[in-house]
Image: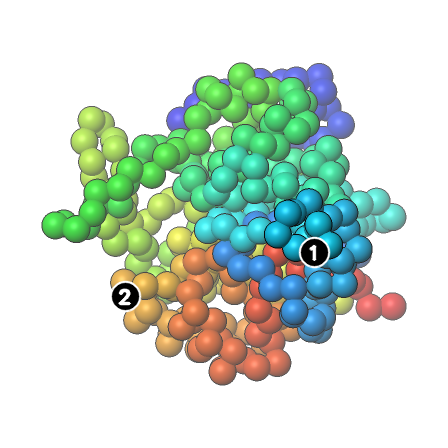
């Protein structure tokens, strides 16, 4: 855990996050509807310039890449090639909410490499200086490290960063007889020294004039979503089991005329737990889109694919967009069960939902 947040004069333009919990398990959060939301994928495990627009998702296509400045090369007869967004094992999303004629931009997660985030923003024609707020879904390094390049790009800016205090915990993956891999954790001290205004929250938080909800810790209610086996935390001088990863949190927006958009980084809480928690917190039953990592990849998680897909199918969502750690088996199962809602993700893709006229 880090120490108490500083109060910076430069942060005054951003809505103050209340010190007291926004909600308890029995309270409803008054999440204000927005006129529109755009989720732009900045970092993900895949990039595909041949994908076409699909429903509410618009693509960064080969045509867009061809119109951008080129890279020099000595091995092609033209002496140049396309400067395209690059994939990595990580996740980052630019969230733009529109309300009463005003747009606000926040960053949800930051990817795995120091410069992957900012370089993809450059390739997509986006400016890091437009980001008003950063939210981290949890403390794993493939969602954090891109803050390095972001900080170097914007300089000391008092940029608010909302994070669960558990994200600073030292962790590892320990599979007996096979693997012991320590997972680098974010450094609260380094972030503060770089001019980031670290705001720690266990409970839910309402941001941007009550139009964006960060869930805080998520209720675990399903029988099948039991966390991440072999995940450990270093607490009280020893490595102890940490399957629940309690710092895992999601971002929720309520788009007028559509319903909830649920955005998750890895979904360590379980994507069904997350969606049910979102509807319970807000009192809004209609779910328009579920986007992000669902963490259903690999032998430990693939048994969860069946009940997860069944529960997601019951939502009747406009768009189900699995990304990052969802895994190809789960993505194929979602596509088979919900062919009209399933949309593959790619860097530069933009989910755009707007209040019907």
First in residue order: circle 1 vs circle 2: 1
Residue 112 lies, with reference to residue 331, above or below; the image says above
> Which of the two residues, 4 or 181, is positioned nearer the viewer here?
181
Q: Residue at x 54, y 30 (%)?
A: 148
Q: Say which mark, if any, is on residue 261.
A: none
Q: Which of the 4 quarters of the picture holds residue 349?
A: bottom right
- Tell me how far mark 1 sits from mark 2, CA to CA: 46 Å
For label 2, the SS is loop
Q: Is residue 99 left or right of residue 184?
A: right
Around disc 1, counting alpha carbons within 10 Å, would you say few (fewer than 14), some (14 to 19), or many (20 or more)? few
Q: Residue at x 40, y 72 (%)?
A: 329
> Which of the two residues, 328 or 300, is positioned nearer the viewer here?
328
Residue 49 lies, with reference to residue 102, above or below; the image says below
Q: Is residue 17 left or right of residue 140?
A: right
Q: Is residue 282 left or right of residue 62?
A: left
Q: Residue at x 58, y 51 (%)?
A: 86
Around disc 2, counting alpha carbons within 10 Å, would you say few (fewer than 14), some (14 to 19), or many (20 or more)? few
Dot in front, 1 or 2: 1
Q: Residue at x 27, y 65 (%)?
A: 299
Q: Which quarter of the image is occupied by the N terminus? A: top left
For label 1, the SS is loop
> Which of the two residues, 174 or 85, is positioned nearer the viewer here?
85
Q: Position of residue 182 (x, y in %)?
A: 29, 37
Residue 250 visible within the image: no
Residue highlighted by disc 1 = 77
Residue highlighted by disc 2 = 299
Q: Position of residue 62 (x, y in %)?
A: 71, 63
1 and 2 marks in contact (CB < 8 Å): no
Q: Is residue 202 left or right of residue 70?
A: left
């Amino acid at each position: 855990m880090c120490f108490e947040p500083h109060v910076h004069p430069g942060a005054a333009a951003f809505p103050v996050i209340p010190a007291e919990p926004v909600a308890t398990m029995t309270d409803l959060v008054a999440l204000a509807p927005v006129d529109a939301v755009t989720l732009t994928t900045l970092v993900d495990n895949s990039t595909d310039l041949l994908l076409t627009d699909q429903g509410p998702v618009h693509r960064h296509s080969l045509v867009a890449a061809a119109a951008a400045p080129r890279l020099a090369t000595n091995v092609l007869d033209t002496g140049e090639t396309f400067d395209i967004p690059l994939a990595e094992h990580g996740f980052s999303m630019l969230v733009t909410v529109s309300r009463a004629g005003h747009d606000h931009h926040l960053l949800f997660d930051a990817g795995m490499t120091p410069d992957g985030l900012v370089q993809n923003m450059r390739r997509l024609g986006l400016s890091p200086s437009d980001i008003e707020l950063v939210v981290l879904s949890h403390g794993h390094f493939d969602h954090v490290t891109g803050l390095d390049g972001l900080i170097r790009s914007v300089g000391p800016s008092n940029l608010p960063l909302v994070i669960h205090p558990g994200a600073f915990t030292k962790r590892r993956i320990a599979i007996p007889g096979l693997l012991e891999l320590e997972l680098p954790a974010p450094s609260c001290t380094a972030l503060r020294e770089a001019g980031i205004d670290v705001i720690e929250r266990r409970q839910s938080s309402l941001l941007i004039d009550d139009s964006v909800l960060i869930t805080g810790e998520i209720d675990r209610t399903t029988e099948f979503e039991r966390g991440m086996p072999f995940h450990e935390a270093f607490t009280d001088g020893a490595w102890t089991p940490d399957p629940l990863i309690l710092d895992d949190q999601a971002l929720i927006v309520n788009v007028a005329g559509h319903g909830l958009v649920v955005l998750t980084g890895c979904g360590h809480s379980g994507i069904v737990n997350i969606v049910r928690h979102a509807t319970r917190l807000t009192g809004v039953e209609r779910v328009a889109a579920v986007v992000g990592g669902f963490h259903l990849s690999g032998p430990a998680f693939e048994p969860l694919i069946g009940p997860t897909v069944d529960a997601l199918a019951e939502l009747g969502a406009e768009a189900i967009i699995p990304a990052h750690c969802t895994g190809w088996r789960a993505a194929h199962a979602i596509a088979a069960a919900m062919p009209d809602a399933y949309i593959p993700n790619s860097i530069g893709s933009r989910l755009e939902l707007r209040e019907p006229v």
